[in-house]
Amino acid sequence: MQSIKTILKKHQELQPYLQRGSFGIEREGLRVTEDGSISLTDHPHIFGSRSFHPYIQTDFAESQLELITPTTASVEEAVDWLDAIIQVTTLGLPEDEYIWPLSMPYDLSHANDIRVAQLEEGGDVAYREGLIERYGKNKQLVSGVHFNFGLDDTFIQTLYKIMQPDMPVHQFQTECYLKITKFYFDYEWLLTYLYGASPLVDARYFDKRCPEPLDHPVKSLRVSDYGYVNNPRLSIQNGSLEDYVNALEEAVKSGAISAEKEYYSGIRYRGKPSARELLESGIKYIECRHVDLHPFDRTGVSRAHLKFLHAFLVYGLLHNQPIVPEKIEESLLFGEELALYPVDASLNETKYNEAKKLLQQMSADFQAFQWKDDILFDEIAKNVQRLNHVEQTLSMRVMNEVGNKEAGMQLARSFKTDYERHDYQTIGFEDLELSTQAVLFDAIQKGIAIRFVDRYDQLIELSYNGQKEWVKSGNMTSLDTYITPLVMENKTATKMILSEAGISVPGGNEYHAFEEAARDYAIYHNKAVVVKPKDTNMGIGITILKPVQSQAQFEQALAIAFKSSKHVLVEEFAPGTEYRFFVLDGSVRAVLKREPAHVIGDGKQTIQALIDEKNKHHWRGEGHQTPLVKITVGESGQMLLDEQGVTLNTVPKIGERIELRRNSNISTGGDSVDMTDEMPNYFKKVAVQAAQSLEAVVCGIDMMILDLSGTDQTYSIIEANFNPMMSMHIFPAKGTSRRLSRDVLETLFKTNMTSA
């Protein structure tokens, strides 16, 4: 039979499939307190029930998190998902709790008080209690990373047709994974040398079940006989799948392990609940369990490491050298010895040459097969250097940089602080709108399964308790009909409907040509008006004139509006303060006062310097990727500065307020102030009536109100928004956060997720 390498050389159209596949990550981690001891608190209720949660689970102990990504199409996407899940988890922990960044615990002072995960299924709890009897608690508290990998289906199918083996396709697929596994076990020791990262542990870890305490740091305690391995070790994957199934079932029958899932091999075969079922369906993917936590990355994994591991597994399929069971056994024994080598030990000459040859051949072959990934080739080159310089291996870095509990806690704190600095984002998905990011954050937290229908169009599918919903741009959902957003997008139609419902709206006229509007200058002379496009939002193209003072000024405002739309409205200026009401399902969930872009003088700095200083806040950015937007002066701002008789070089007096916009949109640099509790019910009822008149379930109502403190109930609704921004309510510049994304999810799925 032709080698796969030979086939790839003949069939170059197959080469791109080498980089494709299915990927998933499971990352374990202990919750620890401020002093580095393992937390004794229950799994946080904020994450909902572990009986169904797709992302945030517990492993052995109540204090041991297991964070799980969905299946993805690339390593990058899997790591992005893991980053987001860890961020959600970290920000959901109590203020004094952290995720321990290392595989081995450094403080077991309260180990006897740690409870196994209190799951709803009694059998799951009993299984964990049995593990205590067999291995003790300490060994079960070891944490690591499981990397799930499946070959691309099209690649397998095409390769099968070319090779035409005398077997069913599912059996051919199984043979591919068996070949990868044998290669993996033959070179697993190399992964231990390069990426072992558990040289140290609390001395109390070495209980009566350990052969003897270790008196020196090692390459990897976790993959050694002291770590997360069967006691005694089981090695049953050197033959056929049928041999594996029979041996695994015999191990359970004999009591060597209590269940198939207790087989702690470096690789597990996946695709069906039981091993015997794989004989009928074939192995669908493999789970690599050899990976120690990478303590220098906030996710606990390294993208470069996982890219190398992916390529390493693929190379196992391409490798031409015969691998016999005896050689695998020899390699596995060496790997067990290497794991307990002193942390600063180098490879012997034979293994060094073998490893260097393998790495160089990997690089040459993947370059020949057009593997496009600079990170991978850079990592292979670094691994060659690690063969020459043991101090560059991960275990040595851990020993030198995280050799005590306080150093570990410094990492844990820094990672939590890093996530807190990005609290307005869902990390890994920063390219999406903030409203979509907020929905993703809350869905991950509450255990709602997420699938991207069209990431670039902000369209996601959410699944919860058997119900599926599509959500676009954060709050465009099946709750509203198709026509409702179209009506609200049309400002003329919105005003007509609201007016007919007895709701106050500003008077005005609609124009379809610049000349037509300019001719009506006399109508608006000396009056306060708003000039705005008919069919835009987020404050684009709007100019407020108080009053219209000249033909030139009026025409300049018209020109700005006509740049954004073919149809322009000139409306009466409604006096008062502008408020945004977020209406959801017949009730006001949040009210925000939006203050126009401005600066306050300090008697020292120019207006430009004050703008620059305000723009330094980390919540201010560009392109609506932050809750607040950086202030830019623009044409409208310059006109307003002229009216105030100042320039950007003017130094305002202490406390002097300089207006930079009249419209108060956040998108033009305005500030957000939560006013939900201060808003009188009268105006809330008006906002609800307006939304109901427009037949909107989700709606943003912009209302000008003259006075909140007195009896004057003068108001005017100036706009309705079909996709109202949620981030400015969730992250107001001042006041209480209103988690509207969670409200939308609760309304969609008709359940209370506040504490679930």
Image (spheres, rainbow, N blue to C red):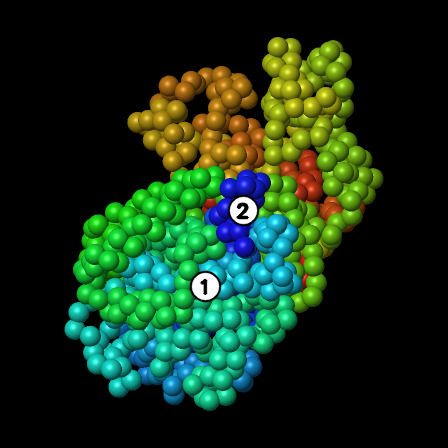
Image coordinates of residue 670 in percent, x first then y, are 51, 35
**Badge nearest the viewer, 2 or 1:** 2
Label 2 element class:
helix
Task: Report the residue at 35% width, 24% height from top.
Answer: 606
Image coordinates of residue 693 in percent, x first then y, are 79, 46
Residue under pointer 2: 7
> Looking at the rendered structure, which numbered label has been put on residue 181?
1
> Looking at the rendered structure, which numbered label has been put on residue 206?
none
Label 1 element class:
helix
For this orientation, the residue located farthest to the left is 215
Task: Report the residue at 50% width, 64% height from top.
Answer: 178
Q: Is residue 166 above or below residue 123?
A: above
Q: Say how many tags the image has.
A: 2
Is tag 2's residue or tag 1's residue first in the polypeptide sequence?
A: 2
Say whether marks 2 and 1 touch (CB < 8 Å): no
Name which residue type carries label 2. Ile
Is 56 situated left or right of 576 in this image?
left
Q: Quadrant of the C terminus?
A: bottom right
717 or 450: nearer the eye?
450
Viewer can see residue 628: no
Is 156 situated left or right of 142 in this image?
right
Name which residue type carries label 1. Thr
Viewer can see residue 471: yes
